Amino acid sequence: KPTIMLYNCGMIAIAHYEALKQMRKLSEDNIPFSFSFLGCNLSTRQSDGFKEIKKAKLRVGLSSEHGIKSRSLIGYTDLETNQDRWFYFPLLTSFNQYEIKCSK
């Protein structure tokens, strides 16, 4: 059963891994979804702020030979621009109508 909570402000929250599981299922079923994340460039060690993707599907990620990045760097296609992009999974902030619940 998904880990979902209702915050005091009425926002519905979901755990990181449950969100990723649902994103993968929707992508597998060819159903687009929306999500947002905090942009991060590790090369420059800077953030370019929050990014909101309105229509996306996940794509094949990095192979396990890329180490930790294969688990934390998630590939997606922005269906509005048809660009293949990446985001860092720990920086995911929302998925469809859900806010991402912080881990303990």
Image (cartoon, rainbow, N blue to C red):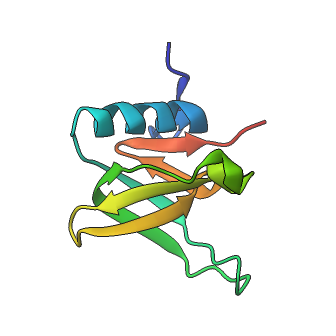
Rendering coords of residue 5 (x, y %): 54, 27
Q: Residue at x 46, y 56 (%)?
A: 75
Q: Left of 70 or right of it: where is 54?
A: left
Between 1 and 23, which is closer to the camera in this rendering? 23
Q: Left of 82 or right of it: where is 95?
A: right
Q: Residue at x 43, y 49 (%)?
A: 60
Q: Is residue 44 above or below residue 61?
A: below
Farthest top residue in view: 1
Rendering coords of residue 36 (x, y %): 45, 59
Rendering coords of residue 58 (x, y %): 38, 49
Q: Is residue 44 above or below residue 90?
A: below
Residue 78 location, quadrant: bottom left
Q: Residue at x 50, y 51 (%)?
A: 61
Q: Is residue 71 visible?
A: no
Residue 97 location, quadrant: top left
Quadrant location, the C terminus = top right
Q: Is residue 55 above or below residue 39?
A: above
Farthest bottom residue in view: 44
Q: Is residue 91 above or below residue 95?
A: below
